[in-house]
Image (cartoon, rainbow, N blue to C red):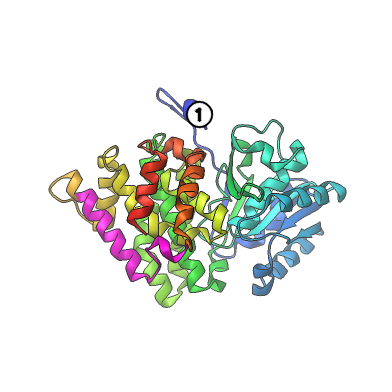
Amino acid sequence: MQSVLKSDRCGDILKFSVPEIFFGRNSLKYAGMCARRMGAEKIFLVSDSGLEKTGWLEQLLDILAQEQLNWVYYSDVHSNPRDWQIQQGARLYKDQNCDVVMALGGGSPMDAAKGIALVASNGGRVNDYEGANRIRDPLPPMIFIPSTASSGSDISQFAIITDMERKVKMSIISRTLVPNVSIIDPELLTTKSRELIIAAALDALAHAIEAHVSRIASPMTEVHSLKAIELIFHHLPAALENRSIDNLEKLSMAGTFAAMAFSNASLGLDHALAHSLGGVLDTVHGIIHPILLPQVMRFNLKSSTDEIAQIGRVILGKSLSSPQETALAGIEKLEAYFESLEVSTKLRDIVPDRSKLQSICEMAALDTCLLSNPRSASVQEMLEICERVW
């Protein structure tokens, strides 16, 4: 990550990486055309059993068949994809002589697809590439189709893979991991449960907030992060109430904007702790943020008052008498917002053993996301944050 911090911004020169994006209702129909345009002869398609049940996988296969494309289907992917699943997938990719990687699903199938493409093209174990800028050779073309409005893996330079031996969620970061094409069809959200819609939107909200206060945020990321916060704050409750495609489309847009922001500005302390918690407990990533994020924002306030005040202004719809007051009021309203969604805001609800907090914080101290947090955090300071939300 140090090299990312040094190279992404130099003087007035900014770097902003995104894939080609197809956005809108029924955009799934372009998947076959995109694969054909990339010269695909045999697609390595990664998805999971959840997408099989919804019918979206069958629809995608029909689209590929219309283009007379061949495919190999790989679905051995858990939530929080495991390192061994990556190795297994990479062997299958090479044995079957595949030439394009396609992913349909949430963050887990997409991150798994990135890992498979990485190992198939660069060799070794996926664990060898933990950290930033360790990928040498180009990856095969990648086409990603997100089924949630959250992870941003279809946009970002990140892949998150679980090291099963260490029980750590590894962050792998490289421009090479940005997919060639992202096809974002909000129709796919119509089959998601209330719980998954909430978890996805709150993950995107955390992406946007942490990107906005990041040490390497820029004007090009700030505009996307603030718009994502606005869209999620206003459209998530409405989407849960009526499931209208209009509101779901706004959530898809918010997830895309948040991904553009965090892919280029990185994340922070909230995600460092969330990765550590997820590695140890194998929890759904999105449910961790309502617990940690407000306290992390309070911790960061000393170093990023103006940036958190800008977030507060979006959440409150107005500014108060000072940036400090606006920032604090925004955090308080964010806490009330989480409570209105009836999600857990206490760490004890997901951590069965309080004694694990010390080791969780020690692992979080090694996470690359911590490097772009606006304020340095020691293990003891992270432990204090966890204790406050226990």
**Is 274 colored magenta in this rendering?**
no
Give 249 or 75, whichever is nearer the viewer.
75
Residue 371: percent from the left, percent from the top? 45, 35
Query: Callout 1: 10 Å neighbours few (<14), some, many (20+)?
Result: few
The quadrant in which residue 139 appears is top right
Number of callouts: 1
* Residue that numbered label 1 is attached to: 2
**In-image side of 389 versus 309 (left or right):** right
Three-letter amino acid code at disc 1?
Gln
Q: Residue at x 43, y 67 (%)?
A: 247
The quadrant in which residue 119 appears is top right
* Quadrant (top left, top right, bottom left, bottom right) of the C terminus: bottom left
Q: Is residue 69 visible?
A: no
Q: Is residue 241 above or below residue 253?
A: below
Residue 340: percent from the left, percent from the top? 33, 70
Q: Is residue 341 visible?
A: yes
Residue 289: percent from the left, percent from the top? 42, 57
**Is 337 colored magenta in this rendering?**
yes
The magenta stretch spans which residues? Answer: 326-350
Q: Main secondary structure of the magenta part?
A: helix
Q: Residue at x 60, y 61 (%)?
A: 27
**In-image side of 59 versus 276 (left or right):** right
- Label 1, secondary structure: give it: helix
Residue 241: percent from the left, percent from the top? 40, 76
Residue that extends furthest to the top in the rendered view of this protein: 11
Q: Residue at x 42, y 34 (%)?
A: 216
Q: Residue at x 68, y 46 (%)?
A: 115
Residue that extends furthest to the left in the rendered view of this protein: 321
